[in-house]
Image (cartoon, rainbow, N blue to C red):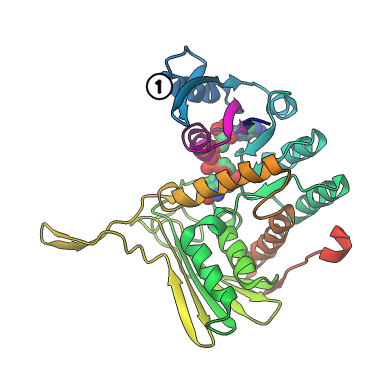
Amino acid sequence: MTELRVGIVGVGVMGADHAERIVRKTAGARLAAVSDADTGRAEALAGRLSERSTAGSASTARHSGGTAYAETVRVVEDPMELIAADDVDAVILASPGFAHADQLFACLEHGKPVLCEKPLTMDAASALRVVEAEHKLGRQLIQVGFMRRFDPEYAALKQLLDSGDLGRTLLLHNVHRNKSASPTFRSEMIVRDSMVHEVDVARWLFGEEITRITVHTPTPTSLVADGVLDPQLAVFELANGALADVEVFVNFQVGYEVRCEAVAERGSATIGLGSGVFTRAGQQWGGTMPADFRVRFEQAYDIEVQRWVDATVRGEIDGPSAWDGYAAAAVCEAGLESLGTGKPVDVALADRGEVLG
Ligand SMILES: NC(=O)c1ccc[n+]([C@@H]2O[C@H](COP(=O)([O-])OP(=O)(O)OC[C@H]3O[C@@H](n4cnc5c(N)ncnc54)[C@H](O)[C@@H]3O)[C@@H](O)[C@H]2O)c1
């Protein structure tokens, strides 16, 4: 295979970002097709990419090894048709979570490797069906977009903890704040769409499953619609007895901030301090905060997509698996139950050995 022909389903915020990434930055891949429930949006993206082209309305020009060449980005109205298309070797799913299950089953049916943005699906039962369907195929085709695993700071933290230099890891403290969220971003979405990242981070850093979750809700900020529980403070209990806590605050007003401190037997390690360029000017000192996740995690997304392309060409995945997506869904489902009561809720997780044989 000379170049991996990638099709993207859903070209809103994340899908459009990945489209640019495939076209501008990813070696060994090209953007073959895009599809969106809003076909006009897909056409606009294809058009926008084409504007920089020398080769007409449906083409984009880019450089590879110093040679500029044109590529055609096809707009496909029906996402299922894109997934089945012969000129699409692999798929990035960046549609909303509720559309993932059907589109993942279609990818499996057509043998298409897929990088699926989190969440894998909306609930644990459907996520488990996806895991089982993939397992039946006998080949891992699904990678889940938990991109923090590819962030250089998180990767360095993981390496440090795994080295054992600090002894056993006992605790994780996480902070996850957004400048603001849309008024439609309800309390449940704070768990399923935001906290899910810390769920994956905790499982990954400890190498253990989360067995119980408690979601506490202090008096909400007055800057959100009535009924939205923001911020939230959750505690995860891990199978080895370790604990992780996370504050998720999606209407923090200031900027995007993600921090993680691991506390171990002989020391602690913190990432996400944002200690970039420190300036003194205009009677102020300090640095800047990223406006959103696309800025803070740009490198993580770049590395994630490049490694996914490279692994796909080898017939492998190189990152969080369908099981990881399922386990995160199971924790979030328990988290949603706890959100209603403030009480600890046990995570109902299938037996990995039984499911994966
Ligand atoms: N990894 C991350 O850090 C990260 C960050 C943001 C979003 N996400 C995930 O990416 C996905 C997309 O989020 P977003 O913020 O880009 O949302 P968005 O609303 O900006 O974009 C979603 C797009 O999908 C389209 N769409 C709706 N239903 C569809 C369907 N059935 N088939 C195809 N397209 C459909 C919409 O028209 C829209 O253009 C979600 O799963 C979200 O959780 C991940």
From the viewer's perspective, is residue 334 above or below residue 68? below
Residue type (three-letter) at the residue carrying disc 1: Arg
Q: Can residue 185 be seen in the rendering of this structure?
A: no
Front one among 65 and 39: 65
The image quarter containing residue 29 is top right
Residue drawn at 61 percent across, 64 percent down? 199
Q: Residue at x 77, y 66 (%)?
A: 348
Q: Is residue 347 left or right of residue 54?
A: right
The residue lying toward the viewer, choosing from 270 and 67, is: 67
Residue 178 quadrant: bottom left
Residue 162 x %, y %: 59, 74
Of 59 and 128, which appears nearest the observer?
59
Query: In screen coordinates, is 30 left or right of 64?
Result: right
Residue 118 position within the rendered picture, expressed as x and y whole percent measured from the top left? 62, 49
Q: Is residue 259 magenta?
A: no
Q: Quadrant of the C terminus?
A: bottom right
Q: Residue at x 75, y 27 (%)?
A: 84
Q: Which residue is mark 1?
A: 52
Q: 147 or 227, which is in the foreground? A: 147
Percent from the top left, x then y, of residue 149? 56, 59
What residue is shown at x 32% (from left), y 64% (from top)?
A: 275
Span of residues in magenta: 8-35
Q: Which residue in the rendered view is the most extreme toward the top?
A: 56
User: Taking 52 as reference, is 35 left or right?
Assistant: right
